[in-house]
Amino acid sequence: TTAETTLILGTIILLNEPHGVVTAWLQAKTEIRAKAILASVTSLTKLTVVGIIFFHNINSSKAYGWTWPLESILIAIGLIFVYKRRTGDALILPDTSIMKELLREGLPFFGGLIAAYIYLRTDIILLKQYGTAHDLGAYSAATQLLTALTAFAPILVMSMAPLMVYRQEDTAIIRRNLTKMTLLVAIFAILAATLTSLLAKWIVPLLLGEEYTLTIPIIRWLSFAAIFLFIESSLNVYL
């Protein structure tokens, strides 16, 4: 039902976002090993539960859906344990004054985030309104396939940022390292976009079928446009 789906998604959001602060704290201290181990253990646990559900011939999508909140619960508990063990302190209790300051300072960012999300959906809305169903299907398929490429942007940036940016205190060093990091990210993005463009004529028929050939030129354009997304991800580290 819609209510249960909302409950599943709400549980994931409520657990992932607040406890993600501990992850950011670990990244700032360039100590990501604990989070990496925790992510591996929880993923294996979820995979085990999924396997149990499957081998017991449980065909309910709800049963599989609840494995995601289970993973979020385990990660949240693990992050609390890591924080407690590293600091010896209990988690900080809510502070009204700090909450008000964060809301005030973060309001422009939240507004921008909402505007960005609306913008991300504008292309689909306009194409649905003024294009054909075939065009919409080809474009949607292209954006879905391109997700595999753009997913590398935050992964690549966050693998370099702790050592090159977060660990540094001198502004000049941070800016110099940020320039180097952005250049490396841009080179990776250009190579990835070129490779994606060259392989598109084989990838699309293999994954989607011959009827989606219209998707090929769209993927080629979007893959090179994604270079700016990689650069933006890198520059956002300093902000």
Image (tube, rainbow, N blue to C red):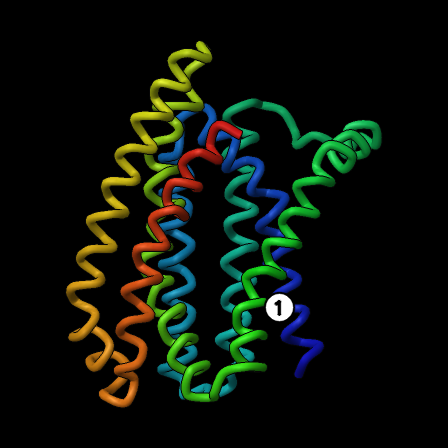
Where in the figure is residue 147, as x and y percent of width and height? 38, 62
Closest to the observer, 91 or 209: 209
Kindly state the secondary structure of the residue where label 1 is placed.
helix
Quadrant of residue 218 within the rendered picture: bottom left
Q: Is residue 111 shown left or right of residue 208?
A: right
Where in the figure is residue 170, as x and y percent of width and height? 44, 10
- Against 46, is 180 above or below? above
Q: How many marks?
A: 1
Q: Residue furthest front?
A: 130
Quadrant of residue 230 within the rendered picture: top left
Query: Measuring 52% from the left and 77% from the top, which residue is drawn there?
Result: 127
Query: Measuring 67% from the left and 76% from the top, which residue is drawn there?
Result: 4
Query: Measuring 65% from the left and 54% from the top, which residue is drawn there?
Result: 115
Q: Is residue 161 shown left or right of residue 117?
A: left
> Which residue has dot 1 on it?
8
Where in the figure is residue 176, as x and y percent of width and height? 35, 18
- Against 145, is 132 above or below? below
Where in the figure is residue 229, as x and y percent of width and height? 41, 48
| Quarter occupied by the N terminus | bottom right
Query: Measuring 38% from the left and 80% from the top, which residue is drawn there?
Result: 138
Identified by mark 1, the residue type is: Ile
Q: For the residue carrying disc 1, how many other residues have a C-alpha within 10 Å: few (<14), some (14-19), or many (20+)?
A: some
- Against 78, is 55 above or below? below
